[in-house]
Amino acid sequence: TICFYLFGFGLMFGQSQWGMFGADSFIPRLDDFWTPTFFVFQLAFCGTAATIVSGAVAERLSFRAYLFSSAMISALIYPLIGHWSWSGLWGHTSEGWLAHLGFVDFAGSTIVHGTGGAVALAAVLIVGARTGRFPLGMPPQKINGSNLPLAMLGGIILWFGWIGFNGGSALELNHTVPHIISNTLLAAGAGLVTSLLVSWILLGYPEATMPLNGSLAGLVAITASCFAVSEIAALIIGAVGGGLVIPAEKLLEKFKIDDAVGAVPVHLFAGVWGTIAVGIFGDPVLLNTGLGRWEQIGVQVAGTLISTGSAFTLAFLLLSALNRIRPLRVRMEEERLGLNITEHRATTEIIDLLIAMEHQQKTGDVSEDVPVEPFTEVGQIAERYNRVLARVRETLQENEEARNILADAFQRVHAEQARAESLLLNILPPAVADQLKENRGTIAHSFSEVTVMFADIVGFTRFADRYRAESVVSMLNRVFSIFDELVDEYNLEKIKTIGDAYLVVGGLPGPTPDHAINVARFALEIMERIQRFRINRSERLELRVGINTGPAVAGVIGTKKFIYDIWGDSVNLASRLESHGLPGEIQISASTAQQLSSRFIVEPRGPIEIKGKGLIETFLLKGLRPTASEPDFA
């Protein structure tokens, strides 16, 4: 209103300069009868042109940009386009250049609606499509309006409002007004029915909003010629206008142009058609331009294209310039939340509820209730939602308690499992324990060469008879615990203890090339360690050790108190070498001596009688040779 009063009215209806623009009547005096009446009537047209843009760019144009667009249309574009055809309507001004050529647009199919549609097209091209409207690799997605009943109500109000637009454009209440109004409503009805039928045929069902836009297209189309056509012509013009809506929308979709409400098809396409239809159907007498039919059509086509093209070009240039200075479009997050919230902070109780629910959805925090607006439908929803939240919190608390119980139980099970694993590894080698856990059936392996050692405490039976059982067991535990530590150090496998005898093997369950060397060093060290033990001041412990190298079989025996054991002649011979050995000496077989002689001091003992074997050549292991290097036991 202010822009049109300060600038637009004078630019449109002031004294014409070369038929292009008005040069006076800015800030007009509204102190007579006709001037304020005419100003208010024309202001309604200006407002129509300006607000057409709002529907096309809905949901993504910033409020600043819309203010600029409204000012641009009402102060410059609409008045300039209007001057070319309508400047002579205010009695004392001359005609614009299009009116001088014979261009006719009675109530603004092009001047109002085509202009608004052209600016809307420029705006949607610059700001782009709404998020999700044209997803990559998918067909266009329809985004439905928020309130269909209000949209329908708006369409009905426009039917009523168009009576004033078109009827009032006669600029006096005379005998032509009823004919103008009846043509207007006939065209609206024809546009509605045509668009309804076209959509029904194409979609297979009567789409709800298409008749609304079809009727508006019929109204736009008849606006240019309603005073000069017959009733049949009005029906045809309205029907064609309504029939253009769907093809125009499909054309925009093809080029990924997102017009939220169909403003461009309704106002630009139907407006262009309706203005050209003046030349096709208009009564030359009523048109009173002095042009023939084809001349009139030519002028209508030229005037329509020039007017809408000029409006589009001006709008595109001005909006593009503004877009470079400050983007016309809001950010994606603002678009998602809605411009009524992000631009104007205009929340409602339903929006507040949705925001609170969305926050809970994102964060998972349901510790707080949503706000309740008393005595409203939304408040009743919020109140019941809070009851659901309360039950959810109770369930979460119960789940947390159950989770804690399960976590404690899991920790206990894990600890027991670790203890059982540790005990199992104390009984079996890790590789054999893994086989046992996988339930592979009988576990048995043959080894072509291992080194077996038996160690026995000399005179243990005599000690056992003289001392208490606790003392005897304590002494054995101390001795064999030292042996156990050395087993790991020399990469050997302890098989078992039998009373005061200790059985250890090198070369299994994983084969090692230096198994004889490892066992020999182990034997020498336990001999050295045993000398440190005292039973009393006068008595020491002594060991007999027997070592043999040869083949053996190893495996797990039994299902209860099972052990990893070895069998074979090599094992029996090592046992005999120990039992037939000398106190404080390590007696070894010829096969073992052969592997040790290069590194160790080995002395022949001579043959001894072994049960089942006869005479066996034996040797005594005395120690490492002085030049021997330390072996690697890793």
Image: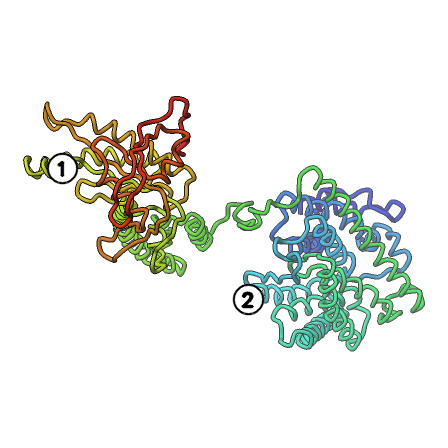
Q: Locate residue 363, reporting x and y percent.
A: 42, 47
Q: Secondary structure at mark 1?
A: helix
Q: Is residue 264 left or right of residue 410?
A: right
Q: Which mark is residue 460?
A: 1
Q: Residues within 10 Å of mark 2 (few under 14, many from 20)?
A: few
Mark 1 / mark 2, whichever is N-terminal? 2
Residue type pointed to by label 2: Pro
Relative depth, front residue between 18 and 616? 616
Q: Locate residue 27, reporting x and y percent.
A: 72, 42
Q: Secondary structure at mark 2?
A: helix
Q: Give residue 392's quadrant in the image.
A: bottom left
Residue at figure coordinates x 21%, y 38% from the top left: 456
Q: Is residue 267 above or below residue 614?
A: below
Q: Which mark is residue 149?
A: 2
Q: Give residue 527's quadrant in the image.
A: top left
Q: Which mark is residue 484?
A: none
